[in-house]
Amino acid sequence: MTSTADEARLGDTLIQFSVDGRFPEEEATSAAYVESSAFPVALKALAEAQTDLETEIRKISRESAPDVDTWIAHAQTIQDDIESSRRLASGIVKQAEADKERLANVSDKEHHVAFLEAELAFSEHLAHSLKVLQWMDATLDQVEQLAGESNLLEALQMLEDVRRRISTAAPDETTRAMRIIDDRCSELRKYIHEQLHEAWAALIDFDFDANALTIHKKLPAGRIDLEQAILALDSFKEVDAVAINFWKELDQIIIKPRTILQSGVQPGVAIDGNTIKSTEGSADHTIKSLFADLTGIIRFLFEKLPRDFISHVSDAMMPILSTRVKENWLDNAVPTSLEDLRGYQVALVQVAEFASELDKMHWPDTASFHDWVSGVPKIWLAKRRETSLDWIRHQLSLGVGTPKVAVKVEKRMVAQEETSHLAATEKDTAEDGWDAAWDSGDDNDKPDPAPTMRRHRSSLEEERTTVQSSLPIPEDVIEDDANDGADAWGWGDEDNDGDGERPATPNPEPSPDITPEPSEVVSDLREMTIAEKYYTSSMPQHVLSTVVTIYEDAASLTQEKNSKLPITPAAPGLFNLPTSVLAMYRAISPAYYSQDPNGNLFLYNDAMWLSEQLNNYQEEWKQRKDLSDRSYGKVRLDQETKTLESFGKRAYTNELVSQRTTLKNFLGDTQNFFQQDPITIEADTKNVISYIRDKCKDWTKLLTWSTLASAIGSLVNSVASKLITDIFELTTIGVDDAERIATILTQVEGLSDLFLKPQNVSQPEPISLAPHFVPLWFRLNFLNQVLQSNLNDIRFLWNESDLSLYFSPEEVVELIRLSFENNSNVRGVVREIERGGRGKGRE
């Protein structure tokens, strides 16, 4: 900004900014650089503006002078008013300060009045408290005086008033004096309590030396009677406790001696006025005499005791009394049979009369006696069940006892030409349901039964001919029967013998030449009766007699002549009781059978005998003419007999499993028997043979011959299975090994004499039934022959004999390769056997 115009514009800009506050809008002006030379011009412009402004102000002042004078006058007036107001305010302030002093003085007076009022209230409260304390103290003095005069009820009521006043006292009233009063109340209450119990003991006088009780309505020298004493006891909340103690003492000296049956003389009860006592030897042992005395006792209590107290005594008395009477007297009156019902009916009438007499007196808690009378069928049935089960339990606890002879009789239709043979062997019993289903119990090691075939040796031909008359039961039937027995008891998870790990044996087909024509079988049949002797323990006879007696009594109750007996409704329940008896037998008898070395076999015989007897009884029941219509169909023992058979068969199986386990241990258990030391092998073989013979000797005294042969056959079959399996597991069989193995097999075959019928021993050439009872017998025999044979003999056994019936081509080839070196002759025989297929025995 150097030009003259710019300098003039600077002055205007400053004037506008100073007067109006406007800032230059042009950027050129606001951002222009002002040189010092422009300042004088700007100052001059400002001075001119100032002069103009002063001139304008003077002009305005001259024009406004009159108005200013008026304003000044008004201002002076206002100033005067302000001074007047200030003086007035000062007076008001002074007046207010004077009022404050007066208010302070009033407040002090008010506080003084409040203090005087509080003092007055305190004095009144103190006076009241002192009067209350004075009343309490005077009342307690009176209570003490009344207690000393035995006026206990009134004293107790006044004492309770004092105690209630103490309990409602304000917190500021719990002074030391009040606490002293409270302590005195407690002492007086304790004193009254002692006095009350002394009075009660005098009112209810138990003389334990004389076994007597005397009840006084009121004491002669006292001011309290029995009812007041009970009210006083109620205030102490001791009525129930006193009633219980009263009952215990009464029971001790009078009721218990009378209600407990004693072997000698029975104490009686005598009543004389207010006294009742127990007398020695004045009562008999009849229920009638008992109820007469109990009625007298209760009537005495009813007449002498207050009604309110009777209910408390009854609550403590009746449950114990009714239970004791039922257990010691009434339960003994319940007969366990139908022979003493007359006495039982008399007892029912006497109980009903006793309960009715108590009801007339309004004596509470007589329901238990009414229930005993109304529940006659249920009570009698429960007693019959209890005594029956207890008797069975006792008889079973005596153990096996003396063995008893039993006979298994069976009728069977057989072919005419077999009659003479069967009469000698009686082998048919080995095939019936009596024991065939459990003849070995060794499902794993039992091969499919092989029918008898021709054999090149005459002795085996005779053995086969003996077995022709009856073939073994198929294995699937045996397994089903075993499973049924296991299912009946939830068993069947036990491991089998484990002898099933043997080479599979093909199922041979029956030979055509032994199958009889149907027409021949039908035309030449005749009935034969076969009997076998065995032994049972003494246990099942007791069970059978109990079951039969129960059924006969139940049938008697359904007769028309007994329709009015009180226990007749128990007949349906009585018909169900034999099931419980049999269940008891099955549940606890194994514990007692186990005490005998042959317990399992006794259990088997007993269960089978009992099942047969029950079946016979059930059939006879259906044919009886002396039964009522209600009795027919009530004896349903089919399921029970099946369960008994399963129960017995399971014991038989368990015994065989145990014996087979022992034999398996003798034979090395899981170890290959023939890989042991020769001395050990020889000793173990002798042990096995001796063990089986000892078992046969022991079991001969128990089992039928067919069952015995089946059991021994199971053991021999187990040994055969183990030996055959171990032979096939050998890697090679040398000459010495073959001879040693053949010797062992020959010793096992020597057990065939155990399968000779006793009546066959006297015959010139008795025939062993070992092949029939030992399914692996022929397999063992042919294996023994193979081990002792050369190649030509083996070729003969395969082509001309029955080796192919019991060994597959693969098994025979394996035996040849184990026993012979691999040369041309061996290969030739192997090719011939493999090419020949089935062999002669399979044609």
Image: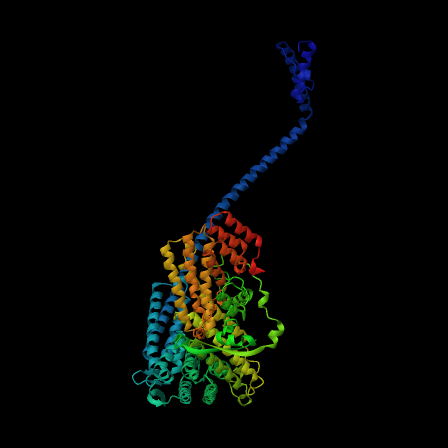
Position of 566 compared to 292: left or right?
right
Whether residue 729 is visible here, answered yes or no, is yes
Work out which quarter of the rendered image holds the C terminus and state it. Answer: bottom right
The single residue placed furthest to the left in the displayed view is 209
Toward the viewer: 344 or 134?
344
Judging from the image, the colouring scheme is rainbow
Whether residue 495 is visible here, answered yes or no, is no
Position of 491 compared to 275: left or right?
right
Percent coordinates x, y for residue 237 in the rendering: 40, 74
Percent coordinates x, y for residue 668 in the rendering: 41, 56
Work out which quarter of the rendered image holds the N terminus and state it. Answer: top right
The relative height of residue 709 versus residue 364 in the rendered view (above or below) is above
Count of numbered marks: 0
Toward the viewer: 838 or 235?
838
User: Who's the residue at 56% across and 57% down the image?
Assistant: 839
Res. 159 image quadrant: bottom left
Percent coordinates x, y for residue 29 in the rendering: 68, 16
The relative height of residue 615 versus residue 43 in the rendered view (above or below) is below
Res. 603 image quadrant: bottom left
Percent coordinates x, y for residue 716 in the rendering: 45, 64
Position of 666 compared to 96: left or right?
left
